Image (cartoon, grey):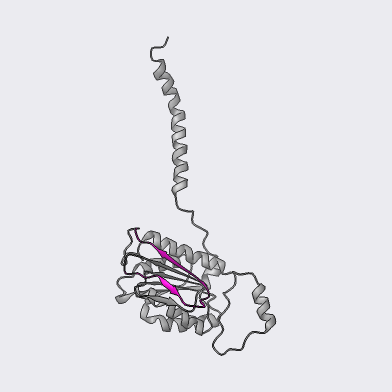
């Protein structure tokens, strides 16, 4: 009879218990971890994209957009970071580059007043016959109505703060998503600097670029003749991006 038989048996089971504990920890980590990062866009797709990032008032409260811009540039994606008051001249610049074939995919991102300016910039680009692939607003501070559309518009706002949801006007084309992040500890001044928000913005931009195997269909300029019936039918049956 071994006086310490029970303890010996228990000790012999410890390695197996440790293995099971490690396995459970690993499985738990996988279950709660965020989704794995998707592949970055191809170099060709990245180089023919341009992301315009619009800061808010005074250029001192939206510096998280500079960080987003630097991360996009590290992927080979050209960016312009500017104050929101430049939205009209930037729209002219983007339209010129698009029509010259230097840009195929246009993405807009704005924070605070920069987010409020996005619908105006989209409307001007549409009037110039230029499509917007994606627009992302971060806590627009004024009530905003989207009358003309990007292919997708994401408005990330703080519902119990100064931010406002974006309203869709009648006849809006494109997808509008209002994402309320209240209760996450994000504030109006910090939303553009928050790591999780930055990762989401970059992931949405990467996904939009990878969907851009061909540029989005241009918006017809005011007064332009209607497309022939055959051409319209072909466009209707073509696969979407």
Q: Residue at x 33, y 69 (%)?
A: 63
Q: Residue at x 65, y 80 (%)?
A: 232
Q: Quadrant of residue 110?
A: bottom left
Q: Nearer the viewer, residue 6 or 72?
A: 6
Q: Residue at x 58, y 89 (%)?
A: 224
The answer to whether residue 176 is magenta is yes
Of all residues, the one furthest to the top in this rendering is 1
The answer to whether residue 36 is magenta is no
User: Where 211 sits versus 28, above or below?
Assistant: below
Of all residues, the one furthest to the front in this rendering is 170
Q: Residue at x 37, y 78 (%)?
A: 84
Of all residues, the one furthest to the bottom in this rendering is 223
Whole-percent x, y for residue 161 in the image = 31, 66
Whole-percent x, y for residue 68 in the image = 40, 66
Question: In the image, 149: left or right of 224?
Answer: left
Q: Nearer the viewer, residue 147 or 5?
A: 147
User: Where 51 sits versus 194, above or below?
Assistant: below
Q: Is there any visible trace of residue 234 in the rendered image?
A: yes
Q: Nearer the viewer, residue 129 or 38?
A: 129
Whole-percent x, y for residue 163 in the image = 35, 69
Q: Indicate the quadrant containing the N terminus: top left, top right, bottom left or bottom right.
A: top left
Residues rendered magenta in the picture: 162-183
């Amino acid at each position: 009879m071994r006086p310490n038989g029970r303890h010996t048996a228990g000790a012999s089971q410890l390695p197996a218990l440790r293995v099971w504990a490690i396995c459970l920890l690993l499985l738990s980590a996988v279950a709660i971890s965020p989704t794995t990062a998707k592949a970055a866009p191809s170099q060709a797709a990245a180089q023919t994209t341009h992301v315009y990032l619009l800061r808010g008032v005074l250029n001192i409260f939206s510096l998280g957009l500079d960080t987003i811009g630097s991360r996009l540039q590290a992927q080979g994606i050209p960016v312009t970071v500017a104050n929101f008051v430049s939205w009209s001249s930037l729209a002219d610049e983007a339209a010129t580059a698009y029509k010259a074939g230097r840009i195929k995919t246009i993405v807009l991102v704005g924070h605070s007043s920069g987010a409020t300016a996005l619908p105006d910039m989209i409307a001007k680009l549409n009037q110039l016959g230029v499509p917007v692939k994606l627009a992302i607003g971060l806590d627009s501070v004024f009530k905003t109505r989207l009358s003309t559309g990007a292919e997708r518009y994401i408005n990330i706002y703080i519902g119990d703060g100064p931010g406002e949801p974006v309203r869709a006007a009648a006849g809006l084309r494109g997808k509008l998503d209002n994402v309320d992040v209240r209760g996450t500890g994000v504030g109006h001044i910090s939303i553009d600097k928050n790591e999780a928000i930055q990762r989401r913005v970059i992931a949405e931009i990467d996904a939009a670029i990878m969907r851009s195997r061909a540029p989005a269909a241009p918006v017809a300029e005011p007064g332009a003749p209607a497309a022939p019936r055959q051409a319209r039918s072909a466009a209707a049956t073509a696969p979407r991006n």
